[in-house]
Amino acid sequence: MLIEVASGIAVFPGGVLTEKSYITCYFAEAGLRRIQISILMLVTAIIMWRYKKD
């Protein structure tokens, strides 16, 4: 679900950047995708740390 939300949020800036420059749009999308993956990994790590069994 988080991936769908982040992708939806990225659509508008992506469309605006595409009007200016395709190369800029491509690198911005790649950067947003890295941030998205980092956030998902961080959330997963926090959940696993919080509910770990000792």
Image (tube, rainbow, N blue to C red):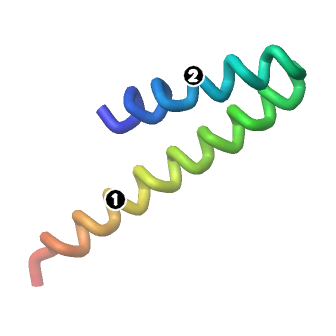
Name the residue rendered at 70%, 36% in the picture: 30
Residue assigned mark 2: 11
Q: In the rendered structure, which disc, 1 or 2, sits on the residue that comes first in sequence?
A: 2
Relative depth, front residue between 17 and 4: 17
Tag in front: 1 or 2: 2
| Circle 1: residue type | Val
Pointer 2 local density, CA inside 10 Å: few below 14, some 14–19, many at least 20: few
Above or below for 28 versus 39: above
| Circle 2: residue type | Val
Tag 1 and tag 2, C-beta contact below 8 Å: no
Q: Check the picture and name the quadrant holding the C terminus.
A: bottom left
Q: Is mark 2 on a helix, strand or loop?
A: helix
Disc 1 from disc 2: Cα separation: 23 Å
Above or below for 1 versus 11: below
Within the image, what quadrant is residue 20 found in?
A: top right
Q: Position of residue 40 (x, y in %)?
A: 41, 50
Name the residue rendered at 23%, 64% in the picture: 47
Q: Where is residue 41 in the image (x, y as percent from the top left)?
A: 43, 56
Q: What element carries label 1?
A: helix
Residue assigned mark 1: 43
Relative depth, front residue between 10 and 40: 10
